[in-house]
Image (cartoon, rainbow, N blue to C red):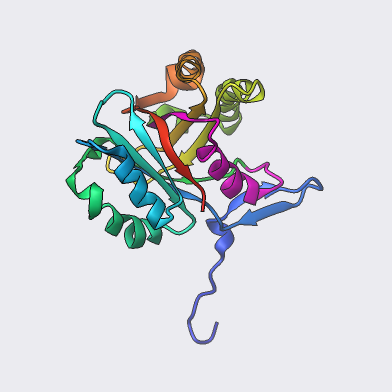
């Protein structure tokens, strides 16, 4: 252009889907999800009360592995939300006496696989409903980093590895036993992980079983460099606003 300005092409960073007619779809909407864990909580109800008053779109978990542990899972389409709303909230009231556990901090974004015909459902509505589903109280959240050898595979082989791994989660989902939430976190955390996985169910055993089953896939056994740490909790309070 004559004035030297540049027109932004948002499709470069958009998530992609495909209509039933084969047309490529684009969306620049996505859900950012953050987990903050704390110790030293003697009154979980007081924390839940602060969240109710703030009308935060969030889930409050009790940590099964720490009798004084909790975690706040919050989500929003704008990452500014975590600085403008969540940060002030956790700096006052019942949160101010808690002990942060930064090793469990996770921040990721929903992403598409390229075949979804309803991107709003895949990127926004479905993960939000799953996180706030009272029938999915138990949750395991963990980050992972793939090895460099996976990135060197041909695209066809990558798809085969991912399809095998994905089929495990799909089988549990079809049976109504457990559901997952997949988040990309490239460049969004201090440990340089690639993804964050949330596995949700109404029973803890199901979550352990699905993680065990996934150990046998090629992705986990051959192409995962690092897994965890794992946060395991049960929802004390859930709200979708």
Q: Which of 207/119 is in front?
A: 207
Q: Which of 29/81 is in front?
A: 81
**Above or below 52: residue 67:** above
Q: Residue at x 33, y 24 (%)?
A: 64
Q: Is residue 113 left or right of residue 75?
A: right
Percent x, y for residue 118? Answer: 69, 48
Residue 42 visible here: yes
Which residues are drawn in magenta?
114-142
Q: Residue at x 56, y 65 (%)?
A: 9
Percent x, y for residue 129? Answer: 57, 42
Residue 152 visible here: no
Q: Is residue 172 left or right of residue 32?
A: right
Percent x, y for residue 139? Answer: 44, 29
Q: Residue at x 56, y 56 (%)?
A: 29
Quarter of the figure with residue 222: top left
Q: Is residue 30 left or right of residue 85?
A: right
Q: Does the segment drawn in magenta span residue 137?
A: yes
Percent x, y for residue 158? Answer: 55, 29
| Quadrant in which the N terminus appears | bottom right
**Above or below 148: residue 117:** below
Q: Which of 21/207 is in front?
A: 207
């Amino acid at each position: 252009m004559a004035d030297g300005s540049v027109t932004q092409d948002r499709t470069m960073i958009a998530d992609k889907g495909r209509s039933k007619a084969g047309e490529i779809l684009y969306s620049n909407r996505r859900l950012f999800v953050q987990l903050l864990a704390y110790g030293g909580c003697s009154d979980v109800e007081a924390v839940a009360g602060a969240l109710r008053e703030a009308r935060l779109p969030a889930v409050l978990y009790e940590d099964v592995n720490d009798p004084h542990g909790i975690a706040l899972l919050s989500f929003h389409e704008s990452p500014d939300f975590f600085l403008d709303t969540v940060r002030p909230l956790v700096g006052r009231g019942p949160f101010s006496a808690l002990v942060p556990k930064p090793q469990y901090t996770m921040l990721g974004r929903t992403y598409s696989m390229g075949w979804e015909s309803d991107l709003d459902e895949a990127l926004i509505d479905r993960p939000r409903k799953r996180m706030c589903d009272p029938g999915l109280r138990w949750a395991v959240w963990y980050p992972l980093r793939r090895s460099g050898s996976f990135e060197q595979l041909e695209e066809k082989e990558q798809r085969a590895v991912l399809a095998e791994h994905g089929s495990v989660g799909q089988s549990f989902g079809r049976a109504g036993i457990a559901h997952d939430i997949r988040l990309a976190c490239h460049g969004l955390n201090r440990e340089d992980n690639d993804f964050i996985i949330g596995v949700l169910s109404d029973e803890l055993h199901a979550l352990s079983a699905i993680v065990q089953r996934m150990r046998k896939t090629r992705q986990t056994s051959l192409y995962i460099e690092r897994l965890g740490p794992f946060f395991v909790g049960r929802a004390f309070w859930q709200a979708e606003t």
